[in-house]
Amino acid sequence: MNTTWHSVSTSEVLEAFSVTMDGLNDSNVTSRQERYGLNRLETKPPKSLIVMFFKQFLNPLIYILLVAAIVSVATSHVIDAAVILVILLINAVIGFIQETRAEKAMEALKELAAPQTQVRRSGKLRRLPSGEIVPGDIIIVEAGDRVPADARLLESAGLKVNESTLTGESQPGEKSISPLPADNSLADRRNMLYLGTSVVQGRGVAVVTGTGMGTELGRITSSLESIDSGLTPLQKSINRLGKILVVVMLGVVSVIFTVGIWRGLDTVEMFFLAVAAAVSAIPEGLPAVVTVVLAIGMRLMAQRNAIIRHLVAVETLGSATVICSDKTGTLTMNQMTLRSLYYNGRNVEVTGEGYCPNGEFRFDGHRLEPETDDSLKLLLTAGILASDSTITVGENECSLFGDPTEGAILVAGAKANLLKETLAENNPRLSEIAFSSDLQYMATLNNSPDGHIAYVKGAAEKLIEMSSHVWLRGKKTTVTSDYRQELHQQVSDMATQALRVLALAYADMPRDLTRLTPNDLSGRLTLLGLVGLFDPPRPEATEAIRQATAAGIRVVMITGDHVTTAEAVAREIGLPVGKAVSGRELAAMSDNELQQQIEHITVFARIEPLHKLRLVQALQSRGHVVAMTGDGVNDAPALKAADIGVAMGRSGTDVARESADMVLTDDNFASVVAAVDEGRAIFNRLRNVVYYLLSSNIGELLMLTAAIAVLGQAPLLAVQILWINVMTDTTITIPLGLEPKSGDELNHPPRSPKVGLLYPGLILRVAYTAVLMAAGVFLVFAWAREHMDIDEARTLAFSTMIAFEWFKGFIARSDEKSIFRLGVFTNRWLLIAVGIAIILQLLVVYSPFLQTAFHTAPFEPQYWLIAVGAGLTLFVIEEIRKILFPLAFSKGKWRRS
Ligand code: ATP
């Protein structure tokens, strides 16, 4: 298709795509979707299943076992070789299934976090997943949006786009709409938007000219992966653990060899013992279980409205010590209602809730007739014209498209019969200054019957400062310092009632002015009045703050709103009392002062997004692990710097989402706390699994070394150890990874970020369990080889080890709480898994086929009492320990414990 859309006029482009400013209609869309496909870049081809399967064989243990299999064949132990290979295959299949399922779950989550775009179709504005956009769609982009496709601009209001990804040019230039020479390079096509670039400022309307692989980015890139897949500290620490265990294993193998030679064992036997030691030292199942626990945990978080973009957040969440939260929309509902007005020196109350224009204006207890009140009409007109949002009034329902702050003003206008459509038609907009948190206001230039007029709405103090006049009793009057004082007093009174206070103003502009800039407004405004908007706190916020506080996490409110409003809202939602600091005060503080005071500050108000980065850094320098919420394009640096950057899924910009580690689908503060809760639970599960596997591995090693040294014989054969590690342990660790939350995850302090899965208490617990198990199996074997033949004695030792594993499944559910407190049936999967493990063990002992494979020989049934008794003893010892000394193994588990 034509690639020089920048050289033709806007009407020609619209014509070429057979579309009007109202957008495509549904039937156009369907046929175009068929023709052009989804708006997607073909990223890396999905991982091939075969590659994924064979990847399971790429680990040192497998190499050792393959060598063992070859040696087995060479020394005529063909059956052993076959068993090793079959178990390896089973291990690979289990790993493969778990990995593919985890991969699928993560893919599904990525879909949930997919960006959306504002599109006009059949005259209506909608938000659609960016993938559904087709050539010819009319799209609207605003500051913070990722441009979803290539498009030709039709309207531009101060639009600046960062195109460095495409052109390498990092200074965003302002966009325009007029046609340009056909031979302009990409960087100079100022009337075009390109996929993958991001809007820095302003607002634009454009018609899509190319999607997916038909875009400039599609042409130059064949792979684009935005979600990183590097290893997280947790995965790295697991790899490190694996390496440590390999070293331990090598040490033990050399000891076994030395002892073997000393005791006169033959070489082949020693070789198999060494293989047994190697097998016993390595937790085969660990990497797969970790992947699965993380994937399941991420799904649970997603169910609680927190979508993880970077796996690392799952770990970091558990050690968060501060949550810095935006106020509007996160702690509050962002459903604004205009409650009060101040104009003409008097306070007027506005009744009614929601976006339907039902309600009236009241002064001194009496109803006001808005039609006869010109000052009121002028005030509301300014608010309506200086806004981009729309409300739709239906029979039963009214809806808002756009910003709730503006919505509240539009609704109040509608209550006075001032409708946006009519006003906009009679006062066409010529230019605008888009709202930004730095400016704290928005302004439009309109061609009104009385001339060119700028209408401004914004933060009250800001506009009071910018005004030279006020509108009083139907006249423009120079503002006196007393009246300014009075206005500030009014702002403060409204703010104390937790209202967001905005001022509305206008300024007459020269006829020849067609492009409005902030310089045209400063010191020239006539203030029309104040409006007070109420934004109800989220009902869940209070409880979530209480939970966070109990969990040793500080909550800090950060808002662009007025200090007094912020403090009033903080009181209402039960934020622990602390200091409130404004952006101005913050700017005056040195880094040192900020670090000293930051522990006592709970509210930061009138904050500009760029201040947030300083706050993150100050908190981090005090050793805090910081979660920071954000939605705007300017929040990106703070989100990146925070340990856990949290972006808003609904109201957030694409840029914020892409900088974040986690995205909230409901923009709700309570979901951050829920994610911390889940994050802690995931970590507990992983620690339980690590305890389970390490105590088995170390127990096996100890038992093997002790038996060879003392008895000159191994109680278990390599294939038997392989059976325990692959069959029994995998069966039991999966349900441990599904352990339900205990409910008191939020009653503990956070985990120290320096401590990974292993902490002193856990290592102690592993050692103590391993010693008990090794001693148990050793004693049983020592006794059994005096009373039965060696195969039976080994089978009994093997079954004793297995019985330890069954009981340890229950023990590993918690290091503190007795199973009877947790509830025997709360983890049903574990009961089923242990049932399966028991059946597998009966099969390996009693089925002739498996007897041959695993060199087992059935012992007398009464000897099961010994095996099960040993396992039960460990269980009873642990249960008693949990009752008497529940915190015996808690050292290092949490911060400051
Ligand atoms: P929070 O930081 O709590 O989420 P916020 O993001 O709404 O609050 P900003 O968007 O930075 O805060 O807004 C700062 C101030 O700008 C507000 O207190 C208000 O006075 C003013 N303001 C907010 N929205 C608009 C708007 N659409 N038009 C004009 N002024 C606005």
Image (tube, rainbow, N blue to C red):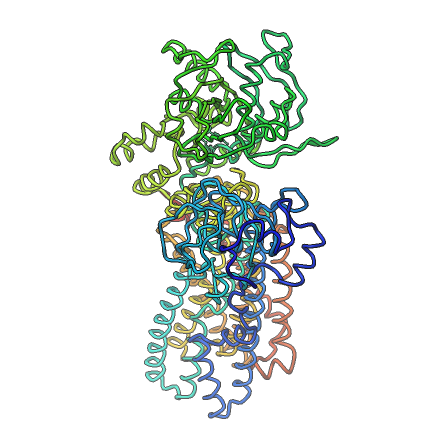
Q: Is residue 214 found left or right of 778 in the rendered image?
A: right
Residue 127 in view, yes or no = yes
Q: Position of residue 55 (x, y in %)?
A: 49, 74
What residue appears at the point 31 percent right and 39 percent down from the top-left corner?
618
Q: Position of residue 763 (x, y in %)?
A: 39, 57
Q: Quadrant of the C terminus?
A: top left
Q: Position of residue 18 (x, y in %)?
A: 65, 54
Q: Residue furthest front?
A: 512
Number of labels in the image equals 0
Q: Is residue 185 above or below residue 500?
A: below
What residue appears at the point 43 percent right and 48 percent down from the top-left corner?
161
The residue lying toward the viewer, choosing from 634 and 80, is: 634
Q: Is residue 591 above or below residue 311?
A: above
Residue 748 in view, yes or no = no
The residue lying toward the viewer, choosing from 569 and 860, is: 569
Q: Quadrant of the N terminus?
A: bottom right
Q: Position of residue 787 (x, y in %)?
A: 53, 77
The residue lying toward the viewer, choosing from 140 and 692, is: 140
Q: Residue furthest right?
A: 395
The residue lying toward the viewer, choosing from 95 and 509, is: 509
